[in-house]
Image (cartoon, rainbow, N blue to C red):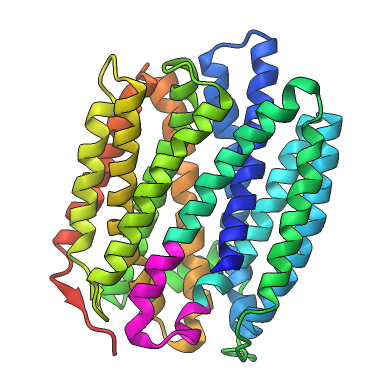
Amino acid sequence: MGTQFQNAFSDNALKQLIILVLLAGAAKAKAGEAANDQLVALVTAVFSAPFILFAMLGGWLADRNSKQRMMVYVKAAEMGIMAFAGVALWLESLPLLLGAIFLMGCHSAIFAPSKYGILPEILPHDKLSWGNGILELLTFLGVILGVVAAGVFSDAFLKEGREWVAGPILMAIAFVGWLLSRQVTPVPAADPTCPVRINPVTDLWRQLRIMKQDRDLWRACWGNTGFYFISALVMMNMVVFCKSVLNLTDTQNSMMNVWLAVGIGIGSVVAGYASRGRIEYRLVPLGALGLALSTVPMGMEGVTADTFRICMATLGFSAGLFIVPVVSVIQHRPSPESKGAVQGSVSSLSFLGIMAAAGVQWIAREAFQISSAQVFWVCGASALICGAYAAISRGRFIEIE
């Protein structure tokens, strides 16, 4: 749990800081809101690309080796990546900054199958939903606090031209993550002789055909993809909206995410405890409805910062209800020797959803001239579609055997 919290925190602190650095450069060049949208979408796409390219490799490594050992190796690599990021921030080089984002995406793509795949190996089955509730709480707290930290770094260092200071700080935090990963319960390799799976297209296609034979797993996989699409679209759009419409500072912009974090934390824990030793699937359409309703005031003209904060909290609560049962199904249904492969496939599809969100953000703003406020309604409509899909495919709950 601690290792995953650190990973989510560092990922998003670096990504958001680089976005803020690039937006500051665009402001100096007097670029418009459209240019800001493009920069945010570019960074998101560069970070997401490794999940599409290397998630299947991460799944193969997670099945072939001890998942705990893979976590240790990946955390060691993160320290070097953060050192590289510090140099990129010091030189203020766009190619190097994007390179740092890409490397961090590679790190997380390899890490994801091990972090999610190990949970059902170290928890009793009747605690899986509870464990996922806590894991999602800490994951999204890490995401939000990482975004908040980026805003603090920006306000503290950017104006003085010392943004590179964030590099050593994030490197030290990565060292803490490495220490935590060494204390994770050791587990044996699930399938030491599994064949190589590194082709991002053919191996993903083969794994999807296998997953389609399990209706619950198949539906959960696509529900998870839709969730990440919605989450990415909300987060990308919020950066632009809070800056250009609500006129918030970088720190105030980032602090807006605290309300989202509080909501997600409460929603995830409630979902975990409501499951009572099983996977309570009725929470999925309920969470989707809450997501949709939360976006209605966000898209209205004249929305105030206080109203927006309340909407962010309810959005987060609904997100927690939605994602905990979905993730639990994805962890529970695969056989022990294929959990890494399934998690790799799910990661690939999740970040295809994020890439799609980057594309939708750009198309909505450029081609259809949709305002940043109205993009939130697109998020709400997408949530309704995901909820309807889940509601017609599954009844009350899934027993954990």
Work out whether 251 lies above or below 193.
above
Depth check: 201 or 399 in front?
399
Residue 284 percent coordinates (x, y): 23, 59
Q: How many marks?
A: 0
Look at 67% across and 71% down and name the residue there: 180
Q: Is residue 392 left or right of residue 229?
A: left
Residue 259 percent coordinates (x, y): 39, 40
- Does the stretch in magenta take in 135? yes
Look at 62% across and 58% down and name the residue there: 7
Depth check: 386 or 163 in front?
163
Classify the position of the C terminus by image quarter: bottom left
Is residue 220 at least partly visible in the picture?
no
Q: Which SS type dominates the magenta stretch? A: helix
Residue 68 percent coordinates (x, y): 64, 80
Q: Is residue 302 left or right of residue 343?
A: left
Work out whether 267 lies above or below 304.
below
Q: Residue 110 falls in which quadrant of the image?
A: bottom right
Work out whether 190 lies above or below 220.
below
- Does the stretch in magenta take in 89? no
Q: Residue 278 falls in which quadrant of the image?
A: bottom left
Q: Is residue 75 left or right of residue 121?
A: right
Look at 69% across and 11% down and name the residue there: 28
Is residue 213 at least partly visible in the picture?
yes
Q: Residue 310 falls in which quadrant of the image?
A: top left
Q: Residue furthest top?
A: 30
Residue 253 percent coordinates (x, y): 50, 28
Span of residues in magenta: 118-136
